Image (cartoon, rainbow, N blue to C red):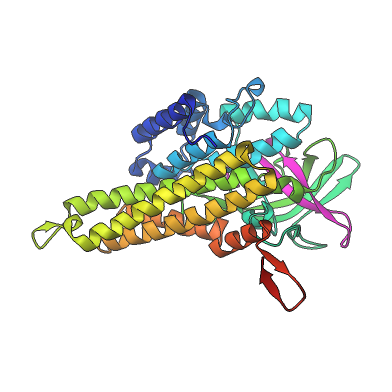
Amino acid sequence: MDAAFSEEQAGIRAALRELLLKHCGVAEVRAAVLTPAGHDEGLWRQLAERLGLAGLAVEQRYGGVGCGPTELALAGEETGRALLPSPLLATTALATPLIDSLGTTEQRAELLPRLASGELTAALALPGAPLPVALGLVGPEGAAPPVGGRAGGVQARRTPDGWRLYGEAGQVLDGHSAGLLIVAAHTGGYVDGRALLFLVGPAEARGVVRARLTVMDETRPQARVQLRDVRAELLGARERDAWGVLAALGGPVAAVLAAEAVGVADAALERTVGYARVREQFGRPIGSFQAVKHRLADLHVAVQGARSAAYYAAWAAGGGQPPSGAAAVGGLALAQALETAWTVTGEAIQLHGGIGVTWEHDVQLYFKRAASDALLFGPVHRLRARAAEAAGLFAVTDEREAVVL
């Protein structure tokens, strides 16, 4: 593994940080989350056109940049630092790779250029399965997530004029505003049924009812999506089980999420250090007290450790490890990053003397992101348990006993 970033990778990071410093301050973030889209659509198009952010994972022949998980992780770290509300996770990290790997030639040619340009955004609807379960980051190995039987979830029915979907999915990231939906739907009988992936585009929007949810972290908007006899198109040329395809994305997505959490933690720590330098108590800055110094030093070490783990996960997902190994590494890195973000932002609230938890203060935004991500993409102990199982650390000898190898 080469731990040094290339000149191109360093340039992507520097250019993105510079643009976000100019156009994505906390005031802009607070304004963007209140828009119908939940993000600044103009800024997203600018990021797509000037930096190719929307097309980082898209091949150059489709108008993208043709980069890999490392570049996506670097972008995720910078957007996490800025708390940027954007379709980066839902569109670039989740939907685009699915279309690229599964889509027919016609589907790729039609959708990938629009996704890469920022013209089109996408969302992944997973009824009955939280994202980390669907990606194989938590849960027992080889176990398929629930998709709903004869009732519940989203059902797919084949008709003479194509597939029709009906049902409901909750907690769909960017589901209220995405122009394209990728839906995991149950088809077949109750016993031998399976989940397939379908495309629901703007042209098939009739019968789609979206409701934006009230969430803890407004910078990560979620929606409930109802499908009422909606026309859909199968993603790909043949029917492939959705969960096997999604599990292959576990490593790259975990690396991006881990890098995002590192960015959140780093920004919160930076703000806290700045506050400790100017906030005075007993006639001197509180940062001069040994107890505060030690706490800040511990947080710095934690952030650096989580950053190293996230970078290693990105390297593993980019070909350094096979997909199963990359998912295990990604799950461990994500667990460390989520735990670090939670610890750092919680300490930031405390070291701000409690004022950080007030609505008017900016540090509470980082705390909400850390808390929300821990709920959406964890829990941490299950991420670690799944990684331990994948590595073969535990073997069951009989129904009553488990031993450590």
Task: Work out which quarter of the rendered image holds the C terminus and state it.
Answer: bottom right
Q: Position of residue 110 (x, y in %)?
A: 71, 27
Task: Work out which quarter of the rendered image holds the N terminus and state it.
Answer: top right
Q: Is residue 156 magenta?
A: no
Q: Is residue 398 left or right of residue 174?
A: right
Query: Is 39 placed above or below 366 here?
Result: above
| Residue 404 visible in rendering | yes
| Residue 358 visible in rendering | no
Viewer-side residue, 143 vs 86 = 143
Instruction: Kindly give the residue lying farthest to the front in the view shown.
Output: 405
Query: Is 185 placed above or below 104 here?
Result: below
Q: Position of residue 153 (x, y in %)?
A: 73, 58
Viewer-side residue, 254 vs 131 = 254
Q: Position of residue 182 (x, y in %)?
A: 70, 43
Q: Is residue 396 left or right of residue 26?
A: right
Q: Is residue 185 magenta?
A: yes
Q: Who's the residue at 69% across and 48% down the image? A: 324
Instruction: Kindly give the residue lying farthest to the left in the view shown.
Output: 283
Quarter holding residue 148: bottom right
| Range covered by the magenta-colored residues | 175-202
Q: Position of residue 135 (x, y in %)?
A: 66, 51
Q: Is residue 317 left or right of residue 397?
A: left
Viewer-side residue, 129 vs 166 = 129
